Amino acid sequence: MDKSASRHRTLRSIHIASTIWFVLCIAYILVLALRQVGVQWWVVFSLSGHGVLIALVLISLYLFAVFRGVSSSQKVVIEHPLTTTTYYAVFYVVTPFLGSLASCLGMIGVSRISQFMLGVALGTLGATFLAWVIVDPAIGMLEMLLPASRKHRARRLALAKAEREAKHRNRDHLLAQVLDKEESDRRYWQDTLKPQAEKLAGLLTAERTDLKQAEHEAISVGVSAWKIGGLSCMRELRDMAIAIRKKSNQNEAVVDYISFWWDGIGSWRAPYLG
């Protein structure tokens, strides 16, 4: 385990270095092209500030994607028998350096430094583009066409689908249990709390001079409901009381004093009237 982790850290370090070298080669080609068309140095430097920021963002996103691809935990060995090997990973991350080395050998005899550096930069760009953008995806697609890869991938996807379906069924089962319990509690509260609901309905008819006493009695009922079933029980009891009061009052509008009387009991909060 330690050896594998050390290998992955080494590959990532090499890949950071090779990517930096790759970006430097691109920057050199860009600057040289701008200078050849007559762009002044001060314009090049003014553009480089924004270019550095964009390059850093692109490099960060790219390295994140590549690290996921280099990590063996992101690929199945049976489905990718070649690209998951250490030898291929080493080849992949050192490709920019290999391109530079090949360019150096091909530029032997060139006397001009600028032409030599341009050849090295172009060789790095070409080799990296060929390996990372064309060859690597092509090899990955060929690996997936192998019979063993296709069979294993189909089985893996089937297992993943079965796991998702099992999770959905478990979630639906738990949700059904919760809903059944809520319904059972509601029926139980409707049966056992009917006297308290009738008492609250009567308190809603209290005269203005008796509101203080009605509030004390309603608070006592609310505390009992909170102890029995928390906020859900309090809501059910309040709805029962309002329904009883409306029924006895020929469905006329009823002032909901209960919501304000119970403010501060447990997690019950009075409605905001602002």
Image (cartoon, rainbow, N blue to C red):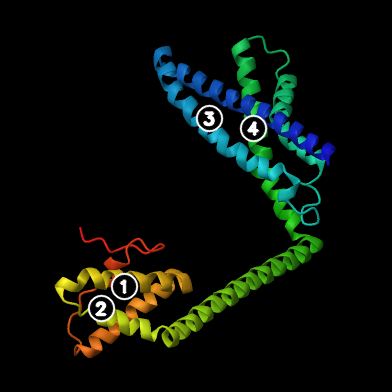
Could you give the CA–CA distance between mark 3 and mark 4, rounded to whole angstroms? 21 Å
* SS at circle 2: helix
Q: Are marks 2 and 1 in contact (CB under 8 Å)?
A: yes
Which quarter of the picture shows residue 226? bottom left
* SS at circle 4: helix
* SS at circle 3: helix
Q: Nearer the viewer, residue 2 or 112?
A: 2
Going from N to C along the chain, the mark reached first, 3 or 4, is: 3
Sort mark 4 into few (<14), some (14-19) or many (20+) by Cα contacts within 10 Å.
some
Foreground label between 4 and 1: 1
Could you give the CA–CA distance between mark 4 and mark 2, rounded to whole angstroms? 86 Å
Residue plotted at (78% across, 35% down): 90
Going from N to C along the chain, the mark reached first, 3 or 2, is: 3
Q: Amino acid at mark 2?
A: Leu
Sort mark 2 into few (<14), some (14-19) or many (20+) by Cα contacts within 10 Å.
many
- Give the left or right position of residue 66, taking residue 80 as reference: left
Instruction: Please give the label number shown on residue 203.
Output: 2
Going from N to C along the chain, the mark reached first, 4 or 1, is: 4
Q: The N terminus is located in which quarter? A: top right
Going from N to C along the chain, the mark reached first, 3 or 1, is: 3
Could you give the CA–CA distance between mark 4 and mark 1, rounded to whole angstroms? 82 Å
Q: Are marks 3 and 2 in contact (CB under 8 Å)?
A: no
Against 64, residue 189 (above or below) is: below
Q: Which residue is mark 4?
A: 126
Could you give the CA–CA distance between mark 2 and mark 1, rounded to whole angstroms? 7 Å
- Percent of width and height locating residue 137: 67, 48
Could you give the CA–CA distance between mark 3 and mark 2, rounded to whole angstroms? 70 Å
Could you give the CA–CA distance between mark 3 and mark 1, rounded to whole angstroms? 65 Å
Instruction: Please give the label number shown on residue 65.
Output: none
